[in-house]
Image (tube, coloured by chain):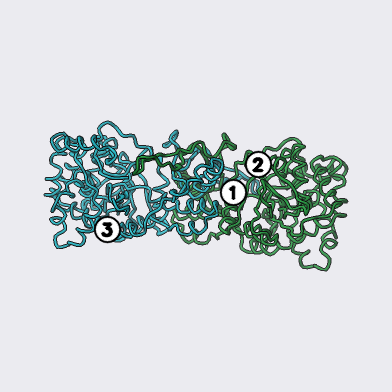
Chain colours: A cyan, B green
Amino acid sequence: MATGWGSLLQDEQQLEELARQAVDRALAEGVLLRTSQEPSSSDVSFILMHRIPSVNGSQFSFPLLMAILVVSYAPFTLFPSLVPSALLEQAYAVQMDFNLLVDAVSQNAAFLEQTLSSTIKRDNFTAHLFDIHKQVLKEGIAQTVFLGLNRSDYMFQRNADGSAALKQIEINTISASFGGLASRTPAVHRHVLNVLGKTKEAAKILSNNPSKGLAMGIAKAWELYGSANARVLLIAQEKERNIFDQRAIENELLARNIHVIRRKFEDVSEKGSLDQDRRLFMDDQEVAVVYFRDGYMPSHYSLQNWGARLLLERSCAVKCPDIATQLAGTKKVQQELSRSGMLEVLLPGQPEAVARLRATFAGLYSLDMGEEGDQAITEAIAAPSCFVLKPQREGGGSVKPSDDYSPDHRLTATHEKL
Amino acid sequence: MATGWGSLLQDEQQLEELARQAVDRALAEGVLLRTSQEPSSSDVSFILMHRIPSVNGSQFSFPLLMAILVVSYAPFTLFPSLVPSALLEQAYAVQMDFNLLVDAVSQNAAFLEQTLSSTIKRDNFTAHLFDIHKQVLKEGIAQTVFLGLNRSDYMFQRNADGSAALKQIEINTISASFGGLASRTPAVHRHVLNVLGKTKEAAKILSNNPSKGLAMGIAKAWELYGSANARVLLIAQEKERNIFDQRAIENELLARNIHVIRRKFEDVSEKGSLDQDRRLFMDDQEVAVVYFRDGYMPSHYSLQNWGARLLLERSCAVKCPDIATQLAGTKKVQQELSRSGMLEVLLPGQPEAVARLRATFAGLYSLDMGEEGDQAITEAIAAPSCFVLKPQREGGGSVKPSDDYSPDHRLTATHEKL
């Protein structure tokens, strides 16, 4: 909605007042990040045991929480972005196709092996994931329920005739984030427009509650696992600035009386175990669902952590995602899917789904060493405005605000006009 | 609900995990305070004008807010407090009586003058307020609509037979705070109980939305003032840690399309004015309602600020509260009301209201210099467990987390068993 509001952007004083209001609203709505200074510091710096005298002269203590921990707001745009309704409908319609495609890929061991064979040779991270995948396949997969929480990222392509087209940039099959915070941003954007007196426009901003949707997926997996006292195990990072995004999902689960325990890979190494039926236990509590909010980047794994990941994958707990689904989200797979005829092989007898999927493909170009990669780079240098160079992790997953792009990330070009 | 949960209070590890969950939930729900390090720093440390290339080669900028401002949570008890339903009902039932009593006092110039005569001689702050009150009376009151947003604070008295009785500690008639944050604490306490698996107890926690109630009062006053484009003027402090409490009310008003402008007394001095009909204007915008979240303590007033307060009181805008209502909330008045026969004088022909009010009186003892005060102090020293010494400001108002009790605050004893 920012386009066409040029005069508004010129009035710096008004913008500042708007920003002040928007920031306070974002904070009040829980659009929060831990500050980078202390992402891992204990949440509760001290609990004051408040003592008051009781009738009989003894003292009664109760915990009163006093604040030290500080947080700030997650970055957000001051104005909402205009999305043509046809493209939104298209994105809704194609999501199930994408989910089924990811599922089909994750179950197609031959396709994964063939597609990732070159990647595995040069990339230790993908090689490690693939090793675990092979081990689990060899032993036999214990889990019977599979859960994917996938996030498709799109940009709009401006066509020559001025119309807009929906183009997928990537699909995240592990630790897809910001569903929690995104649930609270419509209120912030409505506020900004209401302050401007644009009440009609404010009323047009759709509500969005992805944290509830994500929680419902986890709740369904938990239910299908079928053990009333089992927990959801959230694999969390030690330093997690984006914890409020995760808490939003935890809160939705707790409201359904499903308890989440947050643990690190290191905790799994120390206190996780499988019984003879490969049921997973953490601290003697049975685990129905393992929800990964860690483990999508090379830096997340020590040797010990790889051991923990293997333990989790061998269990019959529902992994979100299982390791094959994580591999299905790699850029190399995405690139392979865009090859002519490939969708038809993976989704036989579903020409309509194939057509919907292909309409959103943006064109992926290899930057691998070799002839194909060289060609793409030459084209990009010749016409830079037609390419977005996008930092890329083979582990998939979404970019967190605290992410640094380390040198081992390769680049993939996404052909996209802006 | 803390009583009887002794074993829970012994398990430090569980308490810490509970506290961690409660703090994150409080932050996500907006139970926030600005940190004391930077209560007045600009909310928005920088607005990044994000530039992206457009199709025709020019650049398009849009504001993206990046975080610097940090906040923390307002102190809260980990567990909810048990309130006997009979006492809650009693508090509801007597509130209208208190509101009518405050209103009656505020309109009774003779009672105010007589009651406050000794206070005025020794207390510059009350004397200043009273001067303005007299000036406005002399000129003739321009406002025709009066709005009080009063908060009664209670404690429970344990009777000899073990039953509990509701005792009012004070009534705040200006800048009564924490209605906004209190709207969000039931969710936090439900969360804590749900984590403990106490779902039945969690379901018993009543919802509470005082910010909506307060906003509805202001909205009604705005409506009665009867000017569609007029604003609500919130008189705010420069350093306000408790801004999220206020924003909650502002948000409710904005949702009703009533715009709030936040200004300091200094701004009123510089840019406030009255027209010939004593209509109030701020920055050329008409003001329907003045909502004070400042001006309840001596330290809030420079000579310039007293001038601003007089300007506001002289206007026909609805003040919340007008200066007579602020005076009606002083401890000296509260003490006077507890004298035998006084309620009957102020509320003639309303014996039931008088009975309801008197049942909540806790007994107020003067600590004034003189015989009466000496007697009260002697009693308090002799039986200290029966008295709570309560810091006291003649300006009324509630204690803010950032308040310091300066030496000029006198002490009033509130007779209260715990």
Q: Amino acid at mark 2?
A: Gln
Q: Which numbered dot is residue A322? A: none
- On the rendered structure, is A57 left or right of A200? right
Q: Residues within 10 Å of mark 3 (few under 14, many from 20)?
A: some
Q: Amino acid at mark 1?
A: Asp
- For marks 3 and 2, give the one nearer the viewer: 3
- On the rendered structure, is A178 left or right of A280? right
Q: Are marks 3 and 2 on the same chain?
A: no
Q: Amino acid at mark 3?
A: Val
* Label 2 element class: loop
Q: Which numbered dot is residue B245? A: 1
Label 3: chain letter? A
**Disc 3: which residue:** A94
Q: Nearer the viewer, residue B146 or A200?
A: A200
Residue at the image position 88 percent from the left and 43 percent from the top? B371
Q: Nearer the viewer, residue B386 or A331?
A: A331
Q: Is residue B8 above or below residue A69?
A: below
**x, y percent for residue A276:** 21, 51
Label 2: chain letter? B
**x, y percent for residue B71:** 52, 40
- For marks 1 and 3, give the one nearer the viewer: 3
**Disc 2: which residue:** B237
First in sequence: mark 1 vs mark 2: 2
Q: CA distance from mark 1 to mark 2?
A: 13 Å
